[in-house]
Amino acid sequence: MKDMQALCEQARQLWPSEVQALRIDEAGRLGELRCAPQTLPELADWLFNELSYQFAGLIVEEAGRHWELRYLFYGQAGRLYLLSEQPLAERSFPSLSTRVHAADWQEREAEDLFGLVFSGHPRLGDFVLHDDLWPEGLEPMRRSFTGTRPVSDRQARTDWRPRRIVQAPGAFVMPIGPIYGGATESAHFLLETVGEEVIRAFPRLFYQYRGVEKRAEGAPFSQGLLLAERFAARSAFAHALAYSRAIEALSAVELPPRARQLRVFFAELERFRHHLGTIEGICTSTGLAVAASQAALLEEEALRLSGALAGHRYLFGLAAPGGLAHDVPAAACREAVSQAQAIRRRAQELHQRLRRSSSFLDRLEQVGLISPEQARDHGLVGPVARASGLSRDLRQAQPYSGYPSCSFRVPCEREGDGYARLRVFFAEIDQAVELMAQAAQDLPRGPVRAECRPAAGAALGWVEAPVGAAFHWVRLDESGRIMRYRLMTPSFANWHGFHLAAEGFAFQDFPIILATFGLSVAENDR
Amino acid sequence: MSEWVLQGLRTGIKTTHYPDARERAPGVSPGRPVGGSYPADQAEALLARCPTGALRYQDGQVIIDYRRCVHCFRCARELKTPLTWEMDYEWAGANTPGLTGPFGRSVHILVVDTGDCGACLNEVKQLNNPYYNMHRLGFFITPTPRQADILLVVGALSAPMREPLLQAYQAMPDPKRVVAVGACALSGSLFGPSFACGTGVSELLPVAVEVPGQPPPPLAILHGLLVAVGRRPAVPLSSPNLPMPIPVIEEVHSRP
């Protein structure tokens, strides 16, 4: 099977003069095509809509005197970059988002942070950098911008208004946030309504924008690991793993078998804990106090289990390029599996009780609907996509670490409502414990870490994080310092489609729909 | 519905005895390094491994600034002479005397996230789970600044959250205290100072109590809240200057 070669050849036959194959790595299932900017939309359209490739993200780089834009797609043959170059003075690129809607937010982000223009894009500006705070023309990701000091002419104004609001008799906008509720992440929501039904839901995010990608530039790769691990703690291990995999790809290092297997173990432990937390959130949002307490007990027990086993409740300081930063005895892993199995039994009991509680089910069934077509068009990932009939999982589609030797089933539901998402979360908890048990069984002896000496260059690391597909793209220089770090996170992909689920439902459903998405604002904002 | 009531009763009491007695369950705290006397060459190796500059070497002593420590474990692992690691959780330091009198037993807390990664916030959320149950100590989370006595801030002070944070603080009635939770809120840790993040909440507001850690475990945050109302003594924010150990109380005292 020479899939990638066949794919690239097909593209060259369709656009003979515009497309050029730069790299075809059959073993690595990786390809790169260079094409002229004006051909991009057609080529992307072909990949996304005809071949059903998924769009992972846009990587913008300022390479010397040129812009280099890489559009990352993945699918049956592997990962494919579409590279498009232009001189720095030429800032306009054609927009893909009318044909590949999943690219919408990626282009808006690049417009804000690099000052690029995507011609044909229906809505640019006021995205990452809020118009009421940051000065006009600020392009923080440009090389010429110094990111280590505050922006001097930054000033908070309170006169910001949405650009377009629903015009109907009696219509009003209900603003929520950025500070609201109990211990919630900062985000602002504008809900437009004429009464009870939400006509339009508009999440205004990036109150937690920390400029992580800029912060990484110039840092040694060991420092980058800390940023990768700690920008979104609910999926810390997954992101540290994705980053480590990118560094390993640059080092051509062979991972010790014990590390491969332990990575599966801890990645699944994190998924297990993450989903218990999400279920706690869903129970809390419906006001079912006992169920919420029961789920909170399970989450805390999973946190303690992680803390006792790995030294840190959120698995900080564990993943590292070349393997793991420290070893965990096999007996402790097996003991952790039996504890996790006990927690899972109680989670299953909780699930059964929830299924018998009609007041709970009424709030979830047929509420917050996402159709399979919407999920596909918006490029949704993870449990949200899997609850809408899209069986997408990088652990199976693009396997890594010890996953090729594991057997598991990707849970999938069709309804696309809140209840389907709840069922997917519960099913993934089951799967996670199964995978932990598989990984802890026959754990190979030997070291857990190989030394990494990365060469200069760029590489991609990917994992299926608890929220969905995460991609970390890293370019290092000769001394092992980061030149460009691009974070493409699952929460960013799923927040893009969140409004679809909220629109058409009642106000009081909003917090429940939000909870069933299980999204992280920190992971989106970076 | 009766099924839920029964299930609740069947679960029994899970709540920790802290602060009346020490909590000994494994996994409640990641622990943190302790400073002390080290020869110059070992100290140099330790300092070189610290990614946030939390370690200092002075008069033969390795001194740790807990405001900057992010529990990366790099001073504890893969070294011939690692730093000692203590597994306690009473970490909070104080700059202002606690709220006392009528505030000691009914305290309302407004939680504000200024660019947190989600860890500190999730640990704050855990305070409401049955294991920690902060209501028993008179702590309640409120959604409005008008009713808040304590402003609990997590995160690296992201630029877009400065104004909302300031407005929330100004909307709170006096007397009030600011409790900063987590290394990001104390020093900016990995993210600040930069164009998008600050060097801690004290840049903007008078911080009364500081809870170090990334994230501080729920018990450390609970300790911080108890310090803020003068019900537990504060501990130093650097080591050496070892924190006072809590006496282990075998008999659990009657709850307040």
Image (cartoon, coloured by chain):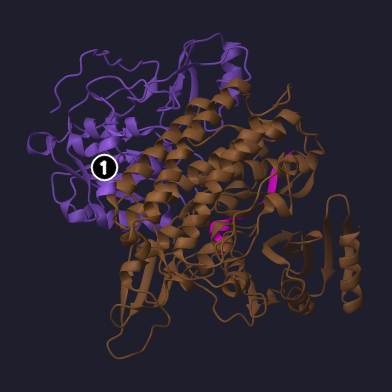
Which chain's residue wears label 1?
B
Q: Where's residue A269, x and y in %?
A: 55, 38
The brown-coloured chain is labelled A
Circle count: 1
Which of the 4 image quadrants contains residue A90?
bottom right
Q: Where's residue A463, x and y in %?
A: 66, 48
Left or right: A158 with respect to A203? Answer: left
| Residue at position x 53%, y 45% in the image | A429
- Determine whether A380 is above or below B32 in the image: below
| Residue at position x 62%, y 12% in the image | B80
Which of the 4 image quadrants contains residue A43?
bottom right
The magenta region covers A480-493
Mark 1 surroundings: few (<14), some (14-19) or many (≥20) residues within 10 A = few
Instruction: Look at label 1 and name its amino acid.
Output: Leu
| Residue at position x 54%, y 44% in the image | A430
The purple-coloured chain is labelled B
The quadrant the C terminus of chain B occupies is top left
